[in-house]
Image: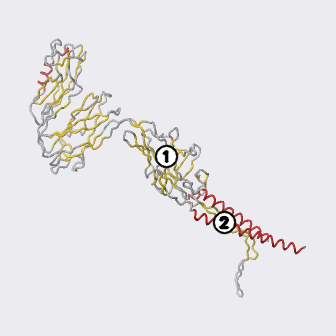
């Protein structure tokens, strides 16, 4: 009878444990990412009354005679099945769809969790706001831009940190240049600097020394005249001021006219102007500089108010300098006299510009089928133009132009019909600040900045385990490794066996309430049955005691 009492007690204890587990499951029915558990029972061997015997030649074998001593809790298994993923609309909420755990660290140890309800603390670290544990990253995303430290795997969300401006280094153009367009234009270049003498607009008769912005001219000072004539002939001469007391603007104009064949230099409303004598394709370009002990303000560059060509198409392109200031670069596609050939000419740039160093890409060719043919010629020109902005006068900026694939029409083309060429993107931008954050399926946090630029900020660590059921729970929805879970394998989402990430979502508990209610009933029934065993045994012992009396 003692065995019956002990068996009944063990049954009560086992049913109590089953009740504890079911109650805990129900208590966490609304806990994000909670994994339900179940109790596994096993019997307890009490006594072997007779061992089994083997059959003989004349008799059969006998089975062992054994009695049990009750039940024990063999284990509490955790159900690692994924819970339902629901959208929350919070950008820093994340759920793992598939295998894996987020990795968090408090500076002493790493813990693992399926709960991705994260927030940003006062130091811009991505953390679990309930504990302060920092979310961990992997890979090099965000390091080059200075968003993440190369010596730490903690994730920082750079609110308030500026993304520095980036000067434009490449521009993409796409569209059609009209193959049948014929409309000759005349090249006209203006200096953009209005010369005055005592506040009065200068003319050809004005003395150079009287011009506003001119000081201390001496004999031998030079004005260097460079550029190219209409036919492409290089020009490189100097006008030497022999006597500054009599040298006039007209003398400078005469020197320019003597150098540029087919063009005429004039003073128009105080501006130096160079105009071709005839319409049609022209490579006329001019630049002036002063050499001397005094000072003489020269035009930074001559604007092309009209480009000489057999036909042309103007296009405006937004470009940024190193400080993020947006400039409008006006350019023109100019049809040359060679069939199926165009030039790209930079006519002017708005804002503070010190010089246009190289303004023409020569020899854009097209195949007979209208596809882009590349840059032609025995010595092909570079596919770039060079500008010197006023805020960095000693650093010319070369801007590459992406015009398409040779033999394809994915960029520029030349078909009959209208002009459709337009910018199709450039890589410069102004400074900006982080305004929004999202996460993609690969677990990469992407920031959207106020300047419209998107940058990868960090990639979250995802840990997978050979036996996730072997992880040890530490509370706060955290797990740590155990000797039976295996070591974590760290990767990004969707790498190896790791699942994908869903932003703005959380995983719910996988507790099935119906199952837990059934477990409650079973625990109650088992407890009642074992209590009956103890009560019955007690009554029998009492009757036995009465026999003695």
The quarter in which the N terminus is drawn is bottom right
Q: Position of residue 312 (x, y in %)?
A: 16, 39
Q: Position of residue 274 (x, y in %)?
A: 14, 27
Quadrant of the image occupied by residue 422: top left
- The one nearer the camera, 461 or 15, is 15
| Distance CA(mark 1)–CA(mark 2) | 45 Å
Which mark lies nearer to you, 1 or 2?
2
Q: Position of residue 499 (x, y in %)?
A: 47, 56
State left or right for residue 286 relative to residue 278.
Answer: right
State left or right for residue 43 relative to residue 502.
Answer: right
Give the labeled residue for mark 1: 137
Quadrant of the image occupied by residue 108: top right
| Secondary element at image label 1 | strand
Give the labeled residue for mark 2: 523
Q: Residues within 10 Å of mark 1 (few under 14, many from 20)?
A: many
What residue sits 49% from the left and 41% below the top? 156
């Amino acid at each position: 009878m003692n065995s019956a009492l002990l068996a009944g007690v063990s049954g009560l204890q086992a049913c109590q444990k089953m009740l504890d587990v079911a109650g805990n499951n129900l208590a966490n029915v609304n806990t994000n990412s909670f994994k339900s558990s179940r109790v596994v029972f096993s019997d307890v061997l009490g006594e072997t009354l007779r061992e089994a015997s083997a059959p003989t030649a004349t008799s059969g074998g006998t089975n062992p005679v054994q009695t049990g001593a009750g039940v024990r809790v063999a284990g509490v298994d955790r159900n690692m099945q994924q819970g339902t993923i629901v959208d929350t609309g919070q950008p820093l909420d994340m759920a793992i769809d598939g295998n894996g755990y987020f990795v968090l660290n408090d500076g002493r140890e790493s813990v693992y969790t399926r709960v991705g309800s994260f927030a940003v603390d006062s130091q811009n670290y991505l953390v679990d706001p309930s504990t302060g544990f920092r979310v961990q990253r992997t890979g090099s995303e965000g390091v080059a831009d200075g968003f993440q430290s190369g010596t730490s795997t903690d994730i920082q969300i750079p609110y308030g940190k500026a993304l520095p401006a980036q000067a434009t280094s490449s521009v993409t153009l796409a569209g059609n240049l009209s193959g049948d367009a014929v409309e000759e234009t005349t090249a006209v270049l203006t200096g953009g600097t209005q010369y005055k003498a005592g506040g009065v607009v200068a003319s050809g008769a004005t003395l150079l020394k009287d011009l506003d912005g001119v000081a201390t001219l001496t004999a031998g000072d030079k004005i260097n005249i460079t550029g190219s004539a209409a036919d492409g002939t290089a020009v490189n001469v100097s006008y030497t001021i022999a006597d500054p007391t009599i040298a006039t603007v007209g003398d400078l104009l005469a020197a320019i006219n003597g150098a540029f064949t087919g063009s005429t230099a004039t003073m128009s409303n105080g501006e130096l102007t160079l105009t071709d004598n005839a319409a049609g394709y022209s490579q006329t370009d001019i630049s002036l500089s002063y050499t001397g002990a005094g000072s003489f303000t020269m035009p930074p560059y001559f604007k092309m108010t009209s480009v000489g060509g057999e036909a042309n198409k103007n296009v405006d392109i937004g470009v940024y300098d190193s400080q993020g200031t947006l400039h409008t670069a006006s350019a023109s596609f100019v049809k040359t006299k060679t069939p199926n050939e165009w030039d790209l000419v930079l006519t002017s740039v708005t804002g503070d510009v010190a010089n246009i160093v190289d303004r023409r890409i020569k020899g854009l060719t097209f195949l007979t089928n209208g596809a882009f043919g590349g840059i032609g010629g025995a010595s092909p020109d570079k596919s770039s133009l060079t500008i010197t902005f006023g805020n960095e006068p000693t650093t010319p900026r070369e801007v590459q132009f992406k015009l398409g694939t040779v033999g394809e029409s994915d960029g520029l083309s030349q078909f009959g019909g209208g002009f459709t060429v337009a910018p199709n993107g450039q890589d410069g931008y102004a400074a900006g600040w982080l305004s929004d954050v999202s996460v993609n399926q690969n677990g990469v946090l992407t920031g959207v900045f106020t300047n419209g630029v998107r940058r990868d900020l960090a990639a979250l660590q995802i840990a997978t385990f050979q036996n996730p059921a072997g992880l040890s729970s530490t509370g706060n929805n955290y797990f740590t490794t155990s000797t039976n879970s295996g070591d974590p394998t760290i990767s990004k989402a969707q790498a190896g066996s790791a699942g994908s990430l869903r932003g703005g979502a959380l995983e719910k508990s996988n507790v099935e309430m119906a199952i837990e209610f059934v477990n409650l009933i079973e625990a109650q029934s088992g407890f009642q049955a074992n209590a009956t065993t103890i009560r019955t045994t007690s009554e029998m012992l009492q009757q036995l005691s009465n026999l003695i009396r």
